Image (tube, rainbow, N blue to C red):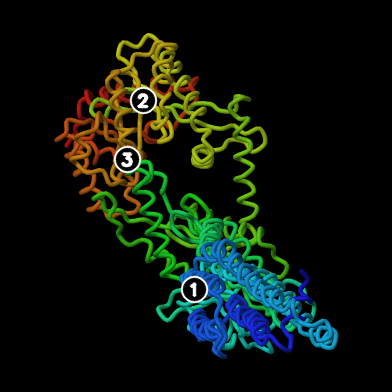
Amino acid sequence: MSLVGVLLSVLQANDDRSHERASYALKTLVAVRSVDSVQLRVAAGEPVDEVSAWFEATVVELESRLTMADGGAPNPGLEIEADTYVHAVRDMLAAISVDDIELADEINETRVGPAFEQVIQLATTVSEDAEASAQAGEETLRVLTWASLLSLAGGLAIMTTLALRSRDRQREELDRWESGRRIRSLVEGSRDVITLVAGQDAISVLSPTLGSLERFSSAPAGAFMSDLLPPEAFRLWRTADAELQSDGGHHEIEVILKATDGATGYFEGHGSLLVSDPTQRVWVWRDVTTRKELELELSHQAFHDSLTGAANRSLLHDRVEHALRLSDRSNKPVTVLICDLDDFKTINDSLGHSCGDELLKTVTRRICDSVRASDTVSRLGGDEFAVLLEDADTNTAVVLAERIIELVSHEVDLDDRKIFPSVSIGVATALAGTTTEELLRNADMAMYEAKRSGKGRSEVYQDQMHEVTSGVLQLGADLKTALAEQQFSLYFQPTVNLTDGTVEGFEALIRWDHPTKGRIPPDQFIHIAEATGMIIGIGRWVLQEACRAAVELQGQRSSPLYMSVNLSPHQLRDPATIDTVRQALEESGLQPEQLILEITEGSLLDNTTAVERLHELSDMGIPIAIDDFGTGYTSINYLQSLPVSILKIDRSFVSGDALEPDERQAFLNAIVSLAKSLNLKTMAEGIEEPRQLDELKKFGCDTGQGYFWSPATPQSEALTAVDRIEAQIVSTNHASLRPTPTIDG
């Protein structure tokens, strides 16, 4: 039966009951639709507790409709279904209140929706029953009231359709609400801070929590960006935000924030326009402190020395170039100091690299304490440092250099040994047009001049230093070919027994016959050979040639001749030295006890490797002599532990140029006495005058060498020198046998 027929029956003049039932059905639809809007209100963002209170009040209205308060009889089935619907809605609201959206959606689909449809169906059935009871009415009444019935039927149909459409809209709103809830959950759980900015800097939306930003800001909800960010960061943001509003693009900024406890935070801000409302801007703030600190650490490592923390060569170059550019505009002087520790390699090799590192760190601190806060201290590598002085002329730089020299020279305790380091400093001030490379090179040349002039001092760069340094560099290049082209030769200086005047042996001394520069003495090229490592090859050649020459000079002499050879610290550290010595002895046929190896005190300074090497050589039967004794720091206890046979007294104690006569004699007597107490022989260098010979004999020195007897000569002249020296002994002896002449009265 049609719905129109049902509604017509409601208006039968003689059936008030049917009219009441039709009204009952219509009112029930209105009440249920009103209750069902609960989901729409929740989706609109109303608080769940407020929606629940409203829902309970609406349920009262629904129940009054169902009980036919106007006197009609209720429909039991419709009451049951309406009650089922109400309970389902209550359960859905309970799930929403605990944020269980998945359960709320399930209740809506499986319980609320079907109960709603059932209520609609029963309301329609009530109307149909009213129509059936009115079938006996007169047709005329139906015709007369057709228009009214049609209107009522249309109203009921419209209400039914609206109710069903409302359900569809509510489902869509619930889906959007659920999506919104998920987005809000993501925002609340995000470590980023999200701000929605309207107007100039008003915050219309702010993340529920400020996360790590809270340590640096305490902006309340609804505040302004000027409350969220400190002044400097706010100014940076405002500029970026203005550009964002102007071009509509995506903008990024980085701000630095300071907490009250002094901590520093780094935050990135990412800004874009809100798609639905371009007048509002979305700024997302991300904490990048950890990443930024790592970047800063990596940057520091890239431009600073890992051992001392000083600037490295790259940073120094950058700052020197910057200083020179500023100097071109301001005419303020730029000066560089190059500081190099004296004899650091000896300390490093003797005490070990850990002690060497500690010394470098100590020296760095002392240099930093000597200069101004605006100056840049750099470690160029090894034991070489540089100091950049901006707005400092040469005179100011020299004063600072002397301060560094004085402070660095203070005592340093390394591994229970007291060390007194010294530093040589070169000073160079930039002239107009000077480049970074030229300025550093000039300071480097001045530093090498300071070392050549006695170390532990400073020198200011002069133009002529360039020629000297260029000559040194050229010598280094020439050394590489000197050995292959046989430019070296050995000269031999006799060693004389001071008791009987006989020649006991020779010391082999190297000479370099340069093809263009002529004869070059050892003190001009040995240090270059040591610095470049070429001393190993040169030292090997000297050993081989000296042993061969010793055998040839021995000839038919009945008493053995000794050959002394200097062994450099580099050779002493070289593992191949033992094999080199053994091979030289085997190839020449020289007996081990006829080879004397001379070493310096500095090469023995707590150098475990060197001492072990000396014991190996001594076990081979080779005598060991300490050269230039008295100029180092060898203690008596340490000397007793070394396999040493001879002490060579330095020529400075023999000539006495730097000492008073009484001091010189006291030193000589002390050294000879020390040697005798340790059962060591003594040899004096640089004997040139009879007076010196007499003093050494008086103190009991064993042997000596010097110009008094003979300079160093080629091998071809060595035996002639021996004959001449020993002939003097015979002549002296013969003269002593002559009778003393008398004077006749």
Q: Nearer the viewer, mark 1 or mark 3?
A: 1
Asked whether the beta carbons under mark 2 and mark 1 sit within 8 Å of each other, the answer is no
Q: Residue at the location (56% across, 37% down)?
A: 520
Residue at disc 3, secondary structure: loop
Q: Relative to residue 425, is residue 609 drawn left or right?
A: left
Asked whether the beta carbons under mark 3 and mark 2 sit within 8 Å of each other, the answer is no
Which quarter of the rendering shows the C terminus?
A: top left
Residue at disc 2, secondary structure: helix
Q: Residue 254, position in %: x, y?
A: 61, 72
- Which residue lies most toward the top here? 556
**Mark identifier at residue 725:** 2
472 vs 504, nearest the viewer? 472
Which quarter of the rendering shows the N terminus?
A: bottom right
How far is the residue under mark 1 from the one under mark 3?
A: 100 Å
* Callout 3 crowding tier (Cα within 10 Å): few <14, some 14–19, many ≥20: some
First along the sequence among labels 1 and 3: 1
First along the sequence among labels 3 and 2: 3
How far is the residue under mark 2 from the one under mark 1?
A: 129 Å
Residue type at mark 3 is: Glu
**Circle 3 sits on which residue?**
601
**Circle 1 sits on which residue?**
90
Residue type at mark 2 is: Ile
First along the sequence among labels 2 and 1: 1
- Which residue lies most toward the left here? 677
